[in-house]
């Protein structure tokens, strides 16, 4: 059967057949059939703003794949740095490529001393770590001026490596400053997630030895958060990238988008909700309040997934491993009861409201000792590799600068009125 649609402009009677390619139709073809008419789609609910070969999501079937590889297989068998390589190079690395990539990332973990001493330490003592991170990432573009040479593959690759390598260092530095603790330099004898935990928690010991179970759990969480198609942060990255802004400025824009509570703050909202519920006895009454529209059920449902979020199943298993080391988070029983009650209630099932990745990730982070102010920062660290993959992809595609249309709803033309004659 031919893959196309036929559009008729009833104003003129003109009819045009438009091909369907990769599940979409080109707006340019549509405008030929219906000139002067724009799609009105707030929030890009039904508009594809990019062609991408990076991440595939089937929300109805609960499928997530990076470069074709199921997220379940990557979470079980891979490492975050291997996944970062996959996202940015299109293929899993060979042993030699993996060793060279890991060595590059490790070499670039240090940040310029002025970033720490003159920039980060200039923030107010109670500055939010995420606000500091947004600013610090943007500031790095002033330290690496070759970052603007986007047409040089070797130079661009160097910026990609620097950003993936330095994000954990910046993140840990922002936390240490916010709690009044001295900065900890990277320990490049440690692996990626281990090194981050060292920079977060090291106090006076000569060599910090992270718990291997916790380090592995964090690495799995990094894999799950590495990319997620055209979300708000990735869209911000692509829009700034379309202007050929440097990778640091574009990553800062993406990080700023993630800072918004509707995007990166969902797991923090889950912890606050569970704390508010307080006990198992209050779960049923809270569920009823949700159904009455009085409160929200945080961590359930997703803009894309109309089935189980495949990451949620993985993260629930990871939670068991973490709690075996840290002891059970006291909010876990409330979370499990909430999930049990909701999934037996047709109100939530009929609305496709299933637990998403944020429902358990906050509990894991809290059990590992991370303050809630760091939850979104922990999201930004791994998502950087996905953002950079999209940045490079749009450069390869020579995408036009983003410039969406609008439907004007303001006043018609009117004449200027001198102030003395304005009666309002």
Image: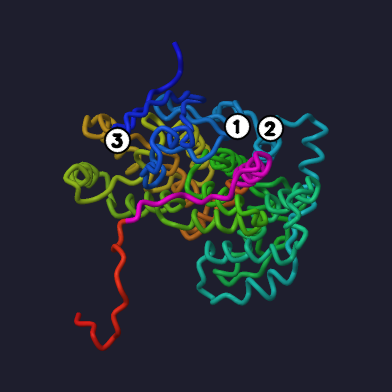
* 29 lies above or below 111: above
Q: Residues within 10 Å of mark 1 (few under 14, many from 20)?
A: some
Q: Which residue is mark 3?
A: 11
Say whether disc 2 or disc 3 marks the residue closer to the N-terminus. Answer: 3
Q: Is residue 90 left or right of residue 134?
A: right
**Is 280 located above or below residue 311 in the figure?**
below
Q: Say whether disc 2 or disc 1 marks the residue closer to the N-terminus.
A: 1
- Secondary-structure class at tag 2: loop
Q: Which mark is residue 346?
A: none
**What separation in Å lies between label 2 and label 1 (alpha carbons)?**
8 Å
Q: Residue at x 34, y 55 (%)?
A: 408
- Mark 2 and mark 1 residues within 8 Å of each other at the beta carbon: yes
Q: Residue furthest bottom?
A: 420
Label 3: how many Cα within 10 Å (few below 14, some 14–19, many 20+): few
Residue behind mark 2: 90
Mark 3–mark 1 distance (CA, rounded to whole Å): 39 Å
Query: Circles 2 and 3: CB distance less than 8 Å?
Result: no
- Relative image position of residue 321 (x, y in whole percent): 52, 37
Q: How is the image coloured?
A: rainbow
Q: Could you tell me which residue is drawn at 71 percent across and 61 percent down? A: 205
Residue sitting nearer the eye, 362 or 9: 9
Comparing labels 3 and 1, the label whose residue is closer to the camera: 3
Sequence order check: which comes first, mark 3 or mark 1? 3
- Residue behind mark 1: 53
Q: Which residues are magenta?
A: 385-408
Residue drawn at 61 percent across, 40 percent down: 216
């Amino acid at each position: 059967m031919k893959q196309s649609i036929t559009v008729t402009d009833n104003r003129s009677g003109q009819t045009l057949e438009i091909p369907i390619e990769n599940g979409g139709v080109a707006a340019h073809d549509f405008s030929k059939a219906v000139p002067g008419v724009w799609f009105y789609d707030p929030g890009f609910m039904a508009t594809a703003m990019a062609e991408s070969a990076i991440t595939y999501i089937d929300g109805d079937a609960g499928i997530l794949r990076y470069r074709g590889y199921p997220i379940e297989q990557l979470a079980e068998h891979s490492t975050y740095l291997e996944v970062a390589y996959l996202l940015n190079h299109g293929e899993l690395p060979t042993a030699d490529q993996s060793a060279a990539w890991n060595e590059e990332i490790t070499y670039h973990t240090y940040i310029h001393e002025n970033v720490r001493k003159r920039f980060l330490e200039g923030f107010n003592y109670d500055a939010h770590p995420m606000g500091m991170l947004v600013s610090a990432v943007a500031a790095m573009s002033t330290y690496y001026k070759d970052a603007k040479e986007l047409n040089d593959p070797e130079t661009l690759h160097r910026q990609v490596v620097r950003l993936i390598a330095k994000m954990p260092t910046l993140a840990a530095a922002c936390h240490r400053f916010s709690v009044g603790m001295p900065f900890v330099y990277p320990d490049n004898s440690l692996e990626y997630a281990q090194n981050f935990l060292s920079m977060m928690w090291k106090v006076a010991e000569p060599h910090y030895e992270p718990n291997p179970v916790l380090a592995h759990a964090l690495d799995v969480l990094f894999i799950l958060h590495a990319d997620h198609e055209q979300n708000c942060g990735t869209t911000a990255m692509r829009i700034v990238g379309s202007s050929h802004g440097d990778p640091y400025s574009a990553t800062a824009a993406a990080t700023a988008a993630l800072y918004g509570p509707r995007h990166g703050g969902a797991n923090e909202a889950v912890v606050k909700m569970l704390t508010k519920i307080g006990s198992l006895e209050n779960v049923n009454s809270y569920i009823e309040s949700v159904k009455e529209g009085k409160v929200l059920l945080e961590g359930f449902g997703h803009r894309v997934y109309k089935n189980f979020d495949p990451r949620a199943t993985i993260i629930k298993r990871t939670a068991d491993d973490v709690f075996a080391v840290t002891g059970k988070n006291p909010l876990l029983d409330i979370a499990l009861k909430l999930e049990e009650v909701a999934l037996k209630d047709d109100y939530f099932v009929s609305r496709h409201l299933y637990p998403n990745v944020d429902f358990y990730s906050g509990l894991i982070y809290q059990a590992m000792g991370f303050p809630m102010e760091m939850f979104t920062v922990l999201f930004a660290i791994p998502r950087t590799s996905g953002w950079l993959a999209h940045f490079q992809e749009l450069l390869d595609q020579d995408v036009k600068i983003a410039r969406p249309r609008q439907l004007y709803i303001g006043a018609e033309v009117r004449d200027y009125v001198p102030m003395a004659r304005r009666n309002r």
